[in-house]
Amino acid sequence: MADHRSRADTQATAAAERSQPADAGVPTHSAAPGVGQVLITVRGISKTYRLKGETVYALDDVSLDIYGGEYLSIMGPSGSGKSTLFNMIGALDRPSGGTVRIGELDLTRLTSRQLAHVRCQYIGYIFQAYNLIESVSALRNVALPRIFAGEPTSAAEEAAARSLGRVGLGDRVHHRPGELSGGQRQRVAIARALVNDPLVLLADEPTANLDFKTGGAIIDLLKQLSVDRGVTVITATHDHKMLANSDRIVWIKSGRIDQVQRREDLDIEEGSVDAD
């Protein structure tokens, strides 16, 4: 009987989600808070797992305000919870408790379809491993988010060409990923993340697979996007080179925010290198 009720509840929930437009309750870009105003509000979020009969906290009562147009780095050792916090902010995972808001929109109360709409329209993702399709061109890789959103291929590819031009790859649109350097592949990933004009750009270890010089160029590009276009850039990283360009650094330790520092309060030595 318990299994039957669970199955019925699941079916009812799925039916409700299908009957509700994917963008129901989602504000327009123009209604989002501007540069310098609070854009993302994290309040008391936790993420727990059951491991061998015990409750493990990946995040424990984390609260944070993130401002429009700022460059924020989330830093901490492996297992500290920084990737979990990153995923909560990016609507890639749901917290066990607490709330995450973009403007007045509470992500924790959205259906799966609404979350998919938010990810498509508001958030761009840059992944450590690039996640490019090797068999198609840079142009098609960048166009795919707009094609998946229902835009005609020709219009999507026009937008993709503009996005590739913004990251300095206007002459590489027809190259496949295997014909590009690591830095160029990461630029394609950035162009793809930008093609829908997101409010927030999330970069997961964006320099991890790059040499020192190329990684520095990618960091500078992300900062330029923040300054010139008002994009809120949030990185989860071990790379201390990020510190010089970050407006604020959130240090995570054992699932909690250890401290939040502003760039001007740090004593950063020239030539800082990656840290484990």
Image (tube, rainbow, N blue to C red):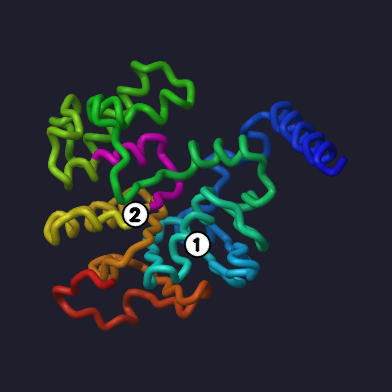
Residue 187 at x, y = what percent?
23, 43
Closest to the camera, between mark 1 and mark 2, is 1
40 is higher (above) or lower (below) than 168 = below
Q: Which mark is residue 95?
A: none
| Residue 173 within the segment the image draws in magenta | no
Q: Earlier in the sequence, mark 1 or mark 2?
A: 1
Asked which secondary structure carries label 2, the reply is helix
Residue for badge 1: 85
Question: Furthest-front residue in view?
Answer: 52
Q: Is residue 224 left or right of residue 58?
A: left
Asked which secondary structure carries label 1, the reply is helix
Residue for badge 2: 226
Q: Is residue 102 left or right of residue 8?
A: left
Which residue corresponds to the image point at 41% horizontal and 16% vertical from the top-left? Answer: 152
Which residue corresponds to the image point at 58% horizontal and 69% vertical from the top-left? Answer: 57
Q: Disc 1 and disc 2: Cα gap in Å?
A: 21 Å
Which residue corresponds to the image point at 40% horizontal and 60% vertical from the top-left? Answer: 70
Between 172 and 57, the residue placed more toward the observer is 57
Q: Mark 2: which amino acid?
A: Ser
Q: Mark 1: which amino acid?
A: Leu
Question: What segment carries the magenta color?
Answer: 188-202
| Quadrant holding the N terminus | top right
260 is higher (above) or lower (below) than 131 = below
Which residue corresponds to the image point at 25% horizontal and 38% vertical from the top-left? Answer: 188
71 is higher (above) or lower (below) than 274 = above
Q: Is residue 262 left or right of residue 275?
A: right
